[in-house]
Amino acid sequence: MNEALVRLGIDSWKPYVAALVLPPMPFLVLIVVGAWFLARRRRLGWGLVASGVALVWLSASAAVAGPVSHWLLPRPPALTEARIAELRAEARGNPPPAIVVLGGGIEGPAAEYGARTLNWRSLERLRYGLYLAQKTHAPVLFTGGVGWADTGGTSEASAAAKIAAEEFGRPLRWLEDRARDTRENARYSVEMLRAAGVRHVLLVTHGYHMPRALRAFNEAAAGTMRIEPAPMGLARRSQKAGVRWLPTNSGYGDMRDTVHELLGLLAGA
């Protein structure tokens, strides 16, 4: 699907397509269809309405979203302290491995900062990438341009560079500011790192996003680089059992992220 949108020249439609197919839109449509049937086939109509309401509820509960996400999008294990120690030794080589942090979005102008800033996904990824850089002494590349759904002119990479230098005191080695999606993250990052002679990449992104990101980077590298996953965001939320079955923002977000990644994998995005 991704390639078809590109060939048709309508790849900018991707945010609209995603909004229409991600929860809760399909379930809301089911409810509307059920309501239309109420005056014609009452039993069918109520069945569709009840199904739509139940799916909206369950898709926003952590008790469903969490297991579904971990089952359909298996996460690679986190880097261990022993592995980080090995990477620290590798970083003394020439060339050293490179840490690649994938952007996850940017916020609009933030009055408190006087500029645009990274959203929470990008900030979490950047923080872990800089943590790895501190532990291993490997250089960092941040990849993220202006996304398909964004109208602003500031790239994620520019915002990340400012935060890394001014707030963490760790300047980034490379900025990739053209990518608009995961495939472009991979393509443009690999081009930059290949030119720098890098042969080993530590890929930093959220665990649920790692299957799609790994596929994109391995395809872009085409065997010329070793792509090693360095997933983050692997901690499970601590909630009481009863609360986990109630609709929450976190449950809703987890389900949308899961469906988004599955559609991305199927579409080749």
Image (cartoon, rainbow, N blue to C red):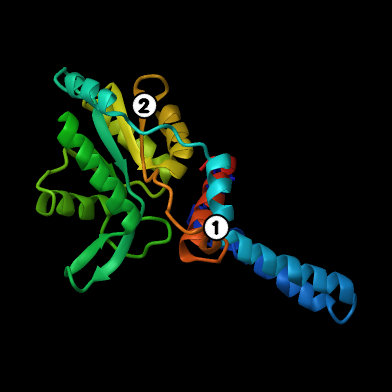
Which residue in the structure is indicated by mark 1?
18
Q: Residue at x 53, y 40 (%)?
A: 73
For the residue carrying disc 2, how many other residues have a C-alpha within 10 Å: few (<14), some (14-19), or many (20+)? many
Query: Quadrant of residue 71 in the image?
Result: top right
Which residue in the structure is indicated by mark 2?
227
Query: Is residue 240 found left or right of 78 in the rendered image?
Result: right
Q: Nearer the viewer, residue 134 or 217?
A: 134
Q: Nearer the viewer, residue 105 or 6?
A: 105
Q: Residue at x 78, y 72 (%)?
A: 34
Q: Residue at x 74, y 65 (%)?
A: 51
Foreground mark, 2 or 1? 2
The mark that comes first in sequence, 2 or 1, is 1
Q: Nearer the viewer, residue 205 or 172?
A: 205
Question: Image height check: is 189 above or below 261?
Answer: above
Answer whether residue 197 is visible to the viewer in this image. Answer: no
Q: How many marks?
A: 2
Question: Image height check: is 174 above or below 118?
Answer: above
Query: Is residue 165 found left or right of 199 in the rendered image?
Result: left
What amino acid is at disc 2? Answer: Ile
For the residue carrying disc 1, how many other residues have a C-alpha within 10 Å: few (<14), some (14-19), or many (20+)? some
**Percent from the top left, x then y, of residue 197?**
23, 22
Answer whether residue 99 is visible to the viewer in this image. Answer: yes
